[in-house]
Image: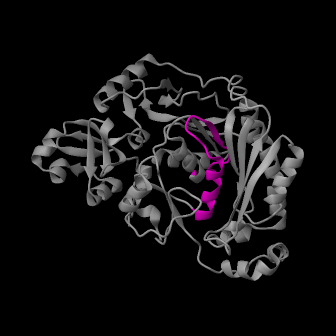
Amino acid sequence: MTLPEAFLKRMEGDLKEQFPAFLRSLEEPPVKGVRANLLKCSEEEFSRLVPFPLGERVPWAEGGFYCPEERPGAYAEHFAGLYYCQEPSAMCAAPLLQVRPGERVLDLCAAPGGKTTQLAARMRGQGVLIANEYVFDRAKILSQNVERMGITNCAVVSASTEELAEALGGYFDKVLVDAPCSGEGMFRKDPGAIAEWSEENVARCIARQRDILDDAARLVRAGGRLVYSTCTFARGEDEEQVENFLAHHPEFALLEQHRLLPHEVKGEGHFAALLEKRGEDDPCDGPCRVRSFPVRRDRAAERAWKEFAADFFKVLPQGTLTTLPDGRMYLLPEGLPALPGRVVRAGRELGEYNGKRFTPAHALAMSAGREGVRRFLALGRGEAERYLHGEALALDGLFGEAEAAATGSGWCVVGLGAYPLGLGKIAGGMLKNHLPKALRAAKLS
């Protein structure tokens, strides 16, 4: 690994006698991790279910494990949303917020979704979680990860931080800013990060981070909390950025900050600071001033949904139903505000009405529990992998003739054991595969 001279000189000045150990650590293999999806399984269940050996627990992250497996994302359990592949030191930021069910939470720079899904697990489906990503293509990836993990109370938007601050000032109890940075903590696992590094880029990142933090300050209510994090080692983007923020925002106080370096911890490196906005704790300040998410009623779409849901669910899901102009139907998280920018996801996606019929969404299967639906096909690993490849399956080959006949016909949830993988439709003794083509797996481990 050939590192930029300016980077080495700066780090030597920062670390002094620790610099040789830091330099040696950059020659070691990158560290990988996985985090159990605690919305779907406990740590203990995950330890039993995961199909590859796990390393030790990540000490600062509930459900986090070190992972020696080369391709942890190539297993059916990953497609079922039982875990998220996340670099271990990156797991340190979200827990600092100590989010609770029922709170209003914002992940301001959220793609690809590791910290969003970590926050969602603590919220247990209660409250409002908004995940924002300015780059629209990255926002779509973020939305796919929210979907895979079965999260129902999250809206995904693509907006500038300034747009969000203008629309939702003072609304949030907790805000996470995992800021765009120079990515020095990526050097071991991504040679491209080394090629892109320059002192000029560090300076650009510092300026951009200041603007983002200024907007984040407006989004937090009095008494609320803000976490700022990066995956870089530059003090100008880390400790000095926090010092500058506090100098310009005296209403905030620093509660704690952590610098994780690869020669000191098992991980690629991360920085995280927890701040609190002082002032009278008024949970109603922002929420009383923002508009609610607009509810658009479409009687024909609602009739089609209710007809489908009566056949699909044992008990109909409750919540505020809205139909977006493009026909997508959602159950909105309670208290969801009107959102600026492009709305990629507005809560629990149900499906789409095209003017004639309702078609369920993949997200509906991923957020459904086995006990809540009328037809759930629990597959073994071999059959589940065939389903993930996109194959149609003969029911009598799966269950035997009598049990196949008892499943009935219509839409069903297909699972790896008790954990949803997607949708299927039973007809004529066959399971027709309705897994979206973009999510099908060419090669599994």
**In the foreground, 354 or 382:** 382
Q: Residue at x 61, y 50 (%)?
A: 138
Q: Position of residue 189 (x, y in %)?
A: 61, 71
Q: Is residue 267 left or right of residue 324?
A: right
Q: Residue at x 50, y 41 (%)?
A: 124
Q: Position of residue 394 (x, y in %)?
A: 19, 50
Q: Residue at x 57, y 63 (%)?
A: 59
| Residues drawn in magenta | 87-113
- Tell me the quarter of the picture where residue 92 sits: bottom right
Q: Position of residue 21 (x, y in %)?
A: 71, 81
Q: Position of residue 341 (x, y in %)?
A: 67, 35
**In the foreground, 177 or 352:** 177
Q: Is residue 94 left or right of residue 163?
A: left
Q: Is residue 256 left or right of residue 141?
A: right
Q: Is residue 2 visible?
A: no
- Tell me the quarter of the picture where residue 376 sits: top left
